[in-house]
Image: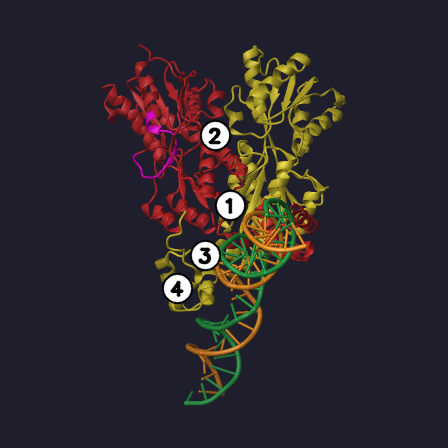
Chain colours: A yellow, B red, C orange, D green
Amino acid sequence: MAKDQPTPTLQDVATAAEVSTATVSRCLNFPDQVTESTRNKVLKAVKALSYSPHFGARAMASRRTNTIGAIIPTMENAIFARGLQAFQDELHEHGFTMLVASTSYRADIEEEQIRALVGRGADALLLIGHERSPDIYRFLETQNVPALVTWAFDTRLPRPSIGFDNRKAMREMALRVIELGHRNLAFISARTTLNDRAKARQLGIEDAMVASNLVSGDLYMVETVYGIEQGSIAFEQVLKAAPQTTAIFCGNDVLGVGALRRAREMGVRVPEDVSIIGFDDIDLAEIAYPALTTVHVPHREMGRRAGKALAELVTNGTSIEAIELDASLVFRDTLAPVKN
Amino acid sequence: MAKDQPTPTLQDVATAAEVSTATVSRCLNFPDQVTESTRNKVLKAVKALSYSPHFGARAMASRRTNTIGAIIPTMENAIFARGLQAFQDELHEHGFTMLVASTSYRADIEEEQIRALVGRGADALLLIGHERSPDIYRFLETQNVPALVTWAFDTRLPRPSIGFDNRKAMREMALRVIELGHRNLAFISARTTLNDRAKARQLGIEDAMVASNLVSGDLYMVETVYGIEQGSIAFEQVLKAAPQTTAIFCGNDVLGVGALRRAREMGVRVPEDVSIIGFDDIDLAEIAYPALTTVHVPHREMGRRAGKALAELVTNGTSIEAIELDASLVFRDTLAPVKN
DNA sequence: ATGCAAAATGCAAGCCCTTACATTTCTGTG
DNA sequence: CACAGAAATGTAAGGGCTTGCATTTTGCAT
């Protein structure tokens, strides 16, 4: 870690190029404010010293970091990894760098991470879902750090968001399922803590039940954590506790695939004996056998749009426009009419 | 973006707590250098003003950012997402924040990203694979930014790395495959540009062929980009061009799963007609039908170890010790003895 | 009480850049 | 060829924090 030859500073470049530090700074930040000959001198010096500006100093002097933070539950979940990749690609295009933190779906960690990224000088934040303590929203306001909510869309909330309506999407899927004659429904849900999306999906199913003259309270719920194995366990649990179930909704494809696996292991035929429906439409859903019927979520699109909106917000102050994207139903092989 | 009430500074806290800025600073950074009563006063003031230190200023004064950069090909690939998650968890535990950039497997972008993250003040860098231009390594040295190579392990190189020996792992798998009587082998590889892992896996197969008295030149190679669909296309290509093939190695599970899918579509039975072998052991491999035989790579473990090593390096100057992890063979249902 | 080392605190000099403002150098025109 | 105005460059003042060193306070043995 020994700093043998100290890293060159703007001053060193200025001296080498025989100009003032201001000129060097301008040359680097606003090249066309500088004569070509001067620019060449400076760039030569920069190269010769292999100078690279000191980030902290720059951040301090300009009060901007060109860094945007993203706080997601976990990258292990393909839907976030996917969206995040698109987000970062977009940011990169706009000259921003991405700072990432994850929460493992824990509210306390999320709060800590938000503070940490703000402390790090993030110019803006990407957040997943609306639900979090008012304190945090207040903190962000005080710190003057704009935050954009994604993976959810709800116009009733004051904050702009870019995402889709989880409740509506699930309602539509549930409506189709009920149309196929299913009356005994179950829902293997992700944990609903700090996860308003999971809750919204449940409400969507219940909406459809009510609209179809079923009793929403009859929806058999199992709540579990993320994971294939968890889906398997939950599946078995559902069939034990509510053997009359003919259609099982899953909060995400990973749980769905887990359910599917256990069905095979238990000799339960899908979709003949029971239908299974996922959510997200990740690769796994298509590869599963039989291929999983699910709700397609435009993860990449969300990431991209969010990146664009945030970059523009920070750069020009363009305020964020809420965008509702569409989730679509993907019918594959795990859903069939109920047996007469 | 209007700064209504300017953010509180260290000075403000100092004034409020009736102490000097130095004391506040110490109170925040080295709490035990300060009397309890003073500490309480200060912390109260911090809370009251909801003060949060200015990152740039801190970075500038301390010459450290507590930020570590990770540059990976893409988060869309579950193996990197997984490893990165573990990496970031570990960093977080040590008080570091992670800066992420991705390269889409392009050398020029990688170079740009490395420079960008160094410019951002990353205290250290996580890199994937050894292969990159000497200029970059020189640059890192000049800038005094330590870099750790992961996802690969090769003691012949001067740089420490934490990972596994791709060549050896693939050789072992290939040996087993050949033992089962397979003589006509093919390899659907990921692009080998800026991807020494892919190359190493190829060499591993060839090693095994040579050791088994086969001609390594007989390995039928198809090189393609990452993606299920690409795996499908490549599979068809292999069977068209080399119909006598009985075992197809794939550079990763995603390609393997794609191959599997096309096999089913084409009516080619796996493993009866042809065996398919993946690499990585991601969820997809287990879920695929039939379940994919593959090489299990300890992605999380790599991420965790790398995070630990880098955090300690930056914090205490503990030099990095190269660590070779084991990849293991996972035999599932896509590999069988060759038909007599 | 007194004196002294150790612990706590304060002072002030940077750290490296950006940018408002001042100054110098060009440019084109009369 | 002089001159106004534009363009290019220079000057210097911060920006918020850490830290070496100086100073004050504390705790304890005498």
Of residue B31 and residue D13, the one placed in the foreground of this image is B31
Q: Is residue B169 magenta?
A: no
Query: What residue is disc 1 on?
Result: B66
Q: How busy is the neighbourhood of tag 3: few (under 14 within 10 Å), some, or many (20 plus)?
A: some
Left or right, B102 with respect to A152, comes to left
Q: CA distance from mark 3 to mark 1?
A: 18 Å
Q: Is residue B161 magenta?
A: yes
Q: Are marks 2 and 3 in contact (CB under 8 Å)?
A: no
Q: Which chain is indicated by disc 2?
A: B
Q: How busy is the neighbourhood of tag 4: few (under 14 within 10 Å), some, or many (20 plus)?
A: many
Counting from the top left corner in percent of width and height, residue B176 is at 33, 17
> Which marked residue is nearer to the observer: mark 4 or mark 1?
1
Q: Mark 1: which amino acid? A: Asn
> Which marked residue is nearer to the observer: mark 2 or mark 4?
2
Circle 3 SS class: loop
- The magenta region covers B156-168
Counting from the top left corner in percent of width and height, residue A6 is at 40, 55
Query: What residue is disc 4 on?
Result: A42
Q: CA distance from mark 2 to mark 3?
A: 34 Å
Q: CA distance from mark 1 to mark 2?
A: 22 Å
